[in-house]
Image (cartoon, rainbow, N blue to C red):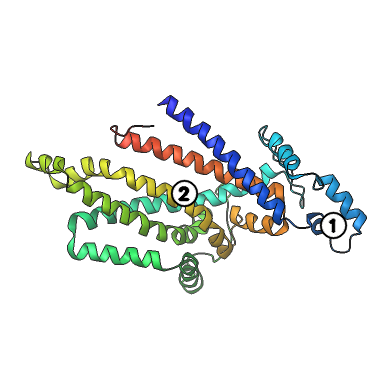
Amino acid sequence: MLSFIVRRLLSGAVLLFVITTVAYALLYVGGGDIARRILGQNATQEAVAAKAAELGLDRPLWEQYGGWLSQAVTGDLGRSWFSGQLVSVGVSSRLAVTLSIVIGAVLIAAVIAVVLGVLAAVRGGVVDRIVQFISVLGFAIPGFLIALGLVLVFAINLRLFKATGYVPITTDVGGWIASVTLPVIALAIGAIASVTQQVRGSVVDALSRDYVRTLRSRGLGSGRVVYKHVLRNAGGPALAILAVQFVGLLGGAVIVEQIFALPGLGQLAVQSTTNGDIPIVMGLVLATAFIVVIVNLLIDLAQAALNPKVRLS
């Protein structure tokens, strides 16, 4: 187990290196005249050249990336070129907002998808068709339309929640729950559709196995067979698709945060990319890639815990 974790962490480090290298190269190619954006259109050419030299933008790409990488490995991600704020502070302050809605959406999707998937697989017939129809709807309706619909119904018409804004959990727990409820639901619906289909398929496959017939012939009830034995074997594929959904929801949070005016990573990513604020963008890329590596590692460990027969390799 320890050797598996070490190997995954090393492969994760290689992945981080590749992702940051590609991202930095793309930013370098498409960055434009960043120094002039910082100083404004009325700045003289001499001032722009001096600012570019100050930021190191006049150096070759490999030198710029090498300088950033040598600082990043020590935990120093630099400062924003536009606001002067430490990148680590700017990213971490917004990371909590994004993770709160993404993790909330994943947890809700996992619970509801397991219930619906097992119900469809075990009951079949009309119940299965209804669940399939609901899943198709979840796939078909774009997330931003769901978000706008939630705002229209629950915030504007019923006035149960605020349409925009975010309350930190350290300030007011009730206010935090109210501010993240609609964004979490908007993100969760699409994830529920995907995971439900995977759970249903895995449970249907597991129910057709010989060991299930053997357990039933020994007099075990259907509930015990399904929830104690079938779900353990069907949980692996469901966890894998849940990990994919987690990564996808990090991207989907960009749109949801814009609609609900949440000060998360998505809002910061849009602003920083538009401005060409390379230190902030690289900090976001690094944080997102790191989260993906850790999530995949945790999913692998959870799969092994659900089914000891799974070989960690």
In the rendered structure, the answer to whether residue 146 lies left or right of residue 275 reads: left
In the rendered structure, the answer to whether residue 103 lies left or right of residue 283 reads: left
Q: Position of residue 261 (x, y in %)?
A: 59, 62
**Amino acid type for the residue under numbered disc 1:** Leu
Would residue 172 be seen by someone viewing this image from the given angle?
no
Relative depth, front residue between 52 and 115: 52
Check the picture and name the quadrant holding the C terminus: top left
Q: Work out whether 90 lies above or below 154.
A: above
Neighbours of disc 1 within 10 Å: few (<14), some (14-19), many (20+): some
Disc 1 secondary structure class: helix
Q: Position of residue 33 (x, y in %)?
A: 79, 57
Q: Residue at x 67, y 35 (%)?
A: 75
Q: Residue at x 45, y 41 (%)?
A: 296
**Amino acid type for the residue under numbered disc 2:** Ile
In the rendered structure, the answer to whether residue 54 lies left or right of residue 232 reads: right
Label ID, residue 55: none
Q: Position of residue 168 (x, y in %)?
A: 58, 51
Check the picture and name the quadrant holding the N terminus: top left
In the rendered structure, the answer to whether residue 187 lies left or right of residue 312 reads: right
Q: Position of residue 154 (x, y in %)?
A: 46, 69
Q: Mark 1 = which residue?
A: 39
Q: Mark 2 = which residue?
A: 103
